[in-house]
Image: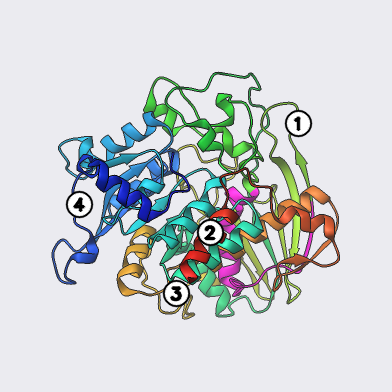
Amino acid sequence: MRRDMSRRDFVRGVAASGAALAFPAIIPASVLGADAPSNIINVAQIGCGRIGLTMDVPGFLRTKGARIVAACDLDSRRLGYMRSFISKKQGGKSPGSIVGVKDFHDILTRTDVDAVSISTPDHWHAQIAIEAAFAGKHVYMQKPASLTIREGRLFSDAISETGRTFLLGSQQRSWRQFQRACAFVREGRLGKIKSIEVGLPGDPGGGSTVKMPVPDCLDYDFWLGSTPDAYYTEDRVHSQMADVVKAVNSRPGWLRCEQFGAGMITGWGSHHLDIVHWAMGWEKIGPRYIEGKGRFHTGGLWDVHGEYDITLTYPDGTPVRVWNEFPNGVRFIGEKGWIFVSRGAAKATASDPSMSGRRLKALDASDPKLISGEPEAELYLNAVRQPQFHHQNFVDSIKANVPSEVTAETAHRSCSACLLSWIGMKLGRRLEWDWKTERFVNDTEADTMLERTERAPYGARRAYERLSRKFKA
C-alpha cells in the first residue's frame, strides 16, 4: 500500500507501469465549458456501507449536475455491489463503467474526480476530508465531523486553507419543517428563549467478544485506521452475512464501540445540536458550561453510552438539556410558548432507531399561531437553497462558489458540542469550556480527552501536518 506516497510519485508510477489503461476514461468537469451539456461535477463515493448505499449515493444520483464516477471501500464485497448499483442506476452497461478502488488515495490522485462523498465509519471522516481538501477535491461528508475535538479543528482548518466547498450530511437543514422552526425562533416569535430541550435515542449493549478470522474480502488493519489495534470480530465492524444487500443495510457494530465513535450523542446529536445552533445563531461558538451523567455499557463488546442527561449552558446563559427521555427532536421554549420540531415519522434509513410509543409531529407549537404563515428571518446568506434536497445544495454551491448550508466550521462546532457532552458524561462533574481557545478552564484531565493517540501511519494530525506544510510551501 502506498498510503504515504506523494501524488507526483504515484502519477509517475502509474505512467511508467501503464496501469492508467485499466481505468475508464472520464472527462473531468474542469475541462468543460460552463454551458456545455456535460458540464457536471464528477463525484467519487468513499465508503460503500449502509449510509453510502441508502443516503449518499441515491442523493447524488438524483442531483442535477452531478455524476458518480468512482467508488471506494476496504471491503471488496461491498465495493462490488456498489459499483453494480451505481452503474445500473446511471444507465451503465456494466460495473466496469464505475472505477472501483480499495485505497482512497487512489481516488484523490485522479484528475477526473472533482468531489468526494465520505460515508465511512466515524473514525475515518476527518483524515479523509483533510487529504481530499489538500488534493483539491470538494468534500461532502457524513456526520459526525470528527472523532475528537482536536481532529475536528484540523479538518475545519484544512477546508478553510484550501478554499474547497464543504457540506456536512446534516440533511435536516434541507427539510422544510426544520427550516421553518429555526426561522421562527430567529425572528422572535417565541420572544426570549428561556431553555431548549433535545431528545435523542440511546444505544443497546451487547455484541459478541468471540475472536474471529478476518474475512478475505476486508483489509482490516487499514479499516482500523488511527484507532488502537484490536482483534477482529464481526460485531466490531459490519455484517458479513451471505446476502450482501441485507449485510450492507444492517446497522453495523462499530457504531456501538467507543473505539470508533461516541455513540448516539454524536450519531444523532450532531443532527439536533446543529439545529439548535442554527436557530440560535451559535454556529461559530460553543457552550460555556457542561454538566452531564450517563451510563456506559459493560460486559459485552459494545461500550457506548445508554441513558444520559446533559445540560449545556451557552455564553448568553441559555440552557440546552439533552436527555434520552425527551421526544426525539428539538423543543425551543420561550417567553411566548414553545415550538417543537422533529422528523415526525420519517427515517433517514430503514435501520434508524425510533422512540417507541411516541407519535411525533414534524412541527408543533403550544399555539398554532406561532408556526403559521411563512417566516421572514434569513437563515443563511450567500447560499444556494434547495429545500428537501441536501446533495443538490452541495453541487450548486460548488458551481456558484458560495458557502453551503453546513460549512466545515459549523460542522466542527456542532460536533464539538456533542463531544463535550460525551466528556461531561465521562467525568460526571461541571466543566467550563473556552470555545475561543477550545480548551477547558483549569481542568487538565478534561483537556486530555480532546484528542486520542493516533496509530501510525494513520491519523488526521499526521495528514494535516504533512499536507498543510506542503500546501503552504
Q: Which residues are magenta?
A: 265-292
Query: In what element is the residue under mark 4?
Result: loop
- Residue at left offset 43%, top offset 57%: 132
Q: Earlier in the sequence, mark 1 or mark 4?
A: 4
- Which residue is the site of mark 2? 466
Counting residues from the start of the chain, the first of labels 4 and 2 encountered is 4
Question: Which residue does the image show at 70% across and 70% down from the upper left?
Answer: 435
> Can you identify the residue that label 3 sits on?
373
From the viewer's perspective, tell me whether residue 48 is left or right of residue 201. left
Specify whether residue 287 is painted magenta: yes
- Give above or below for 296 relative to 138: above
Residue 243 at what x, y percent from top left? Answer: 38, 22
Q: CA distance from mark 3 to mark 2?
A: 52 Å
User: Mark 3 or 4, which is nearer the eye?
Assistant: 4
Count of numbered circles in the view = 4
Residue at position x 28%, y 57% from top? 111
Circle 2 crowding by C-alpha within 10 Å: few under 14, some 14–19, many from 20? few
Q: Secondary structure at mark 2?
A: helix
Q: Earlier in the sequence, mark 1 or mark 2?
A: 1
Query: How far apart are labels 3 and 4 at the CA level?
Result: 47 Å
Which residue of the protein is positioned furthest toward the front in this rendering? 16
Q: Which amino acid type is shown beneath numbered disc 1?
A: Thr
**Depth check, front residue: 22 or 350:** 22
